[in-house]
Image (cartoon, rainbow, N blue to C red):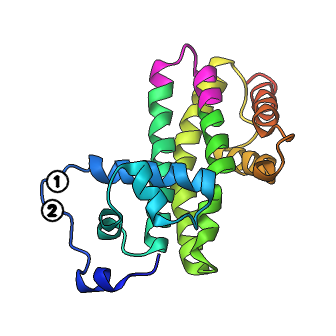
Amino acid sequence: MAETESDRSHPARPQQVGRPRRSQQALLDAAAAVFVTSGVDAPVREIAVEAGVGVGTIYRHFPTRPELVVAVYRHQVEACAEAGPRLLAESSTPEAALRAWVALFVEFLVTKHGLASALHGDSAGSDALHTYFVGRLMPVCGDLLEAALESVDAAPSVDAYNVLKGIGNLCIGAASDARYEAGALVQLFITGVLSRGPR
């Protein structure tokens, strides 16, 4: 996302006080949708069309492509994290909540996890994203897992970290193989996690 001459003459301005965050959220949603279909190197114009704004609006919020990619990645992680408590409150059972959240997590990994690699070898940036990802989602997974285990009176066999790691490993390669059913395999994995011996 190289800056044009006109972009350099108008440096990025801080977001106005009181400006609704909705506009930035809409940009991130649009960018995420475009990244899924066209990859993280998609033209900025395509994102602008999806969001219904001008290209300059994208640059004002995110002056460089890495900034946009990191913002989209964080936005998607937050959406996944915020879904956990909501599903636990709204689902018929804690197990149903866990399974629904796991399905969202699989979708995130399969369609959007490649965002992290778009930092073009910036290992420090990638490491920071991974730390943020694990730190934000592990407690959410832990709460769902604990509630689901209690509801079926099962003893914990693995912790939330290993559940996330196991799901991640089952999702490897899914985006490039249409026949690979990561979601179904992950649900079988969850069945195993919840079917260990009684407490």
Residue 61 seen anywhere in this rendered image of the structure? yes
CA gap, disc 1 and disc 2: 5 Å
x and y, in percent, of residue 186 in the image: 77, 36
Find the magenta span and give its range: 88-100
Q: Given the image, on which type of amino acid does mark 2 rest?
A: Gln
Q: Which residue is outermost to the top?
A: 92
Q: Residues within 10 Å of mark 2 (few under 14, many from 20)?
A: few
x, y (%) of residue 10? 23, 80
Give the residue drawn at x 59%, y 33%.
101
Give the residue number, with chain letter if any, for mark 2.
16
Q: Is residue 94 left or right of residue 2?
A: right
What kind of residue is marked 1?
Answer: Arg
Q: Which of the two residues, 160 or 5, is positioned nearer the viewer here?
A: 5
The secondary structure that most of the magenta stretch takes on is helix
Q: Secondary structure at mark 1?
A: loop
Return the residue found at the far right: 179
- The question of residue 93 being in magenta is answered with yes
User: Mark 2: which secondary structure?
Assistant: loop
Q: Residue at x 44, y 62 (%)?
A: 45
Coordinates of residue 180 in the picture (x, y in percent): 85, 41
Q: Quadrant of the C terminus?
A: top right
Q: Check contact, mark 1 vs mark 2: CB within 8 A.
A: yes
Task: Provide the residue designation for mark 1.
Answer: 19
Query: Going 81% across and 25% down the picture, which residue do you hit?
Result: 197
Q: Is residue 160 or residue 167 the one in the foreground? A: 167
For disc 1, the neighbor class at 10 Å (few under 14, some 14 to 19, many from 20) is: few
Residue at image x 82%, y 37%?
181
In the image, is residue 128 above or below residue 144? below
